[in-house]
Every structure is written in structure tokens, then in C-alpha cells.
Amino acid sequence: MEEVSKDPSRLTQRGAQAAGRLLQEERIRKKLNKELPKVSPAPNRKLTIKLEQDLINVLQAWEDETGDDFLVYGERYLDVLERLSRVEKPPAARNVSLPNINWLTV
């Protein structure tokens, strides 16, 4: 679906078949948008921190119970989480005051 939608020549084609393909693409796109889960960018920072800590606790318990490392793509996932938590968070947007432009009003 993604590959087909990137092809610009599909928009310049003429005829009933081309129109039918575009309608079919739109139907598929709508269906996928309804079925795919909605992901919010960053819900609540406190909730995110709690979920991360819960995940770490569960993974540590699993590793203690099994005696094996929990690996994702051959890398210990607790190490990945630790590395991600050390990455510097972007600074909060500064409040920048705009200059007074009242003298420009007509």
C-alpha cells in the first residue's frame, strides 16, 4: 500500500480503471486508519516514567527467575532502557517575548 501510494504516475493516468484504483486506495487507507491503534506522542510524563519503571522491574524479575538475559535483537533490553534514559532530554521551550509592535497598527 505504501509503495503504491508513493508512485506519482498513478495520479496522471486516465480512464475508469485509474479512477477505480484511486477509490480502492482511499478505501484501504480509511480502513487501515480505523484499525491501526492510535498512538499519542507523549501522554503524561509521570505515567511514562511509572510505566518505564514497571517494565524495568518486570524485566529484572524475569531475568532473576530464569537466569537468562532478556534480549531484543541480540542486545540486553535493560541495557537499552538504561542507555535511553541517559540520553539528554531536549530543553523545554523557552518563553520568548515578542517585541511590542503596537505602533505598527493602522
Image (spheres, helix red, strand yellow):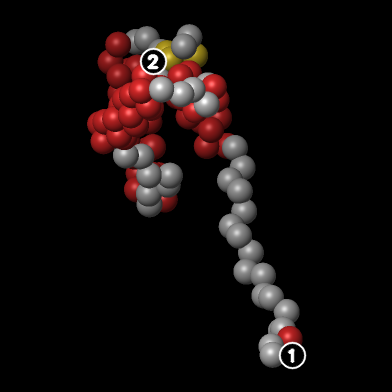
| Quadrant the C terminus occupies | bottom right
Residue 92, x across and y down, in percent: 59, 57
Secondary structure under tag 2 reads loop
Q: Is residue 25 visible?
A: no
Between 17 and 37, the one lying in front of the other is 17
Q: State the residue at coordinates (41%, 22%).
A: 15
Height in image: 45 above or below 99?
above
Q: Nearer the viewer, mark 1 or mark 2?
A: 1
Q: Which mark is residue 86?
A: none
**Taking 85 as reference, is 31 left or right?**
left
Instruction: Name the residue beneath numbered marker 2.
Output: 70
Instruction: Name the residue beneath numbered marker 1.
Output: 103
Height in image: 52 above or below 91?
above
**Quarter of the image where one finds residue 35:** top left
Secondary structure under tag 1 reads helix
Residue 50, x across and y down, in percent: 35, 44
Q: Is residue 74 visible?
A: yes
Q: State the residue at coordinates (38%, 52%).
A: 44
